[in-house]
Amino acid sequence: MKKIAVAYLVTGTLLLISIWCGVAIGSVHIPFEVLWNQAVDETAANIFWKIRLPRVLLAGLVGASLAIAGAAFQGLLKNPLADPYTLGVSSGASVGAVMTIFFSLSIPIVGLYALPIFSMIGAIITMVVVMSFARMVDRSLKMETLILTGVIFSSFLGSLISLMIALSGEELRQVVGWLLGSVSMRGWPYVQMIIPFVLIGSLMLWTQRRELNVLLYGEERAKHLGVNVKRSKYLILAGGSMLTGAAVAVSGTIGFVGLVVPHMTRMIWGTDHRHLLPLSFLNGATLLIICDLVARTIILPRELPIGVITAFIGAPVFSYIFYKQRRSKGVRA
């Protein structure tokens, strides 16, 4: 219990520090007094409340969504290489979002929420198709089969996105800028857009925290222990796809967060999903806030896409995990 308390204390403290660094550091320094007295520096106060704070909160929500979704997918599939990016779910969400922009799709009544809704539909459809195809190829759903299936479908979906880019006119700048992954100049409307989906998706996964623990021992044993495996799978896949779709809709494609954060959290704080899910949520928020801070300050006055920073971190970690798994299998053989 003491270790878990320390885990939440350390994780929460790091998140608060990253939030303050995110809002304070930049081309304009934000003094701490602005929090309670805007008269200290009105220009800095406007930047804080209208630009920096919504950007940092959006980065945090996107990172948290991808991280908790990755933790749930890894637990469900018993595979540390599973995440929304490697499974093709992010690509499916991207297709849904790009189609919404390209065809100017809208849904009556929902207005601004049409983009995340279509993005989530794309994510869910992709997840179902990838899982179904992988099971057809290999009923045991081995790691290699699942990852290769995700790569295949990601490539196909990427070609669809490229086709829409090639055919786009005025939408080209918007689509390309969105695909690179960024939380720049999104503002409070995008924060309001993602919050409902983050709350609902995270709650769906949180309700399955004990089921995820039991599923680590295999589906047959889970059934004997009273888990409705089919229902749990649907809830986890739906919740993870909802979070991925919403994150992709507001920020574009940002890879490896759902892979790196749950894996590192599991290594440091353990595999119990009762704590792994919320700790991954907090750590994902911290990581993406820091990555966004680096992206917008490393080559001032220009900005890098945030997806570039996460790829620099994620690709070596992905390689290390894959190498470690293959080596351990070779030793056991």
Image: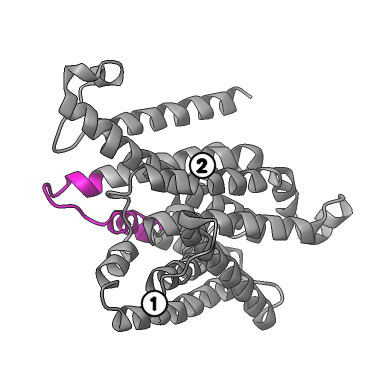
| Residue at screen point 48% across, 48% down | 194
- Left or right of 270? Residue 67 is left
Above or below 226: residue 5:
above
The image's mark for residue 161 is 1
Instruction: Report the amino acid beneath label 1.
Output: Ile
Q: Which of the pair 128/271 is nearer the observer?
A: 128
- Left or right of 140? Residue 178 is left
Looking at the rendered image, the quarter that the C terminus falls into is bottom right
Instruction: Report the amino acid beneath label 2.
Output: Phe
Q: Residues within 10 Å of mark 2 (few under 14, many from 20)?
A: many
Q: Earlier in the sequence, mark 2 or mark 1?
A: 1
Q: Quadrant of residue 155?
A: bottom left
The image's mark for residue 316 is none
| Circle 1: element type | helix
Give the image location of residue 307, x and y in percent.
Answer: 32, 58
Above or below 257: residue 138:
below
Residue 189 in sight from this viewpoint? yes
Give the image location of residue 119, x and y in percent.
Answer: 50, 64
Residue 74 in sight from this viewpoint? no
The image's mark for residue 281 is 2
Q: Quadrant of residue 318?
A: bottom left
- Left or right of 247? Residue 137 is right
The extreme left residue here reads: 301
Give the image location of residue 252, x and y in percent.
Answer: 38, 60
Give the image location of residue 71, x and y in percent.
Answer: 56, 50
Numbered disc total:
2
Q: Provide the residue span drawn in magenta.
A: 294-317
Secondary structure mostly seen in the magenta stretch? helix
| Circle 2: element type | helix
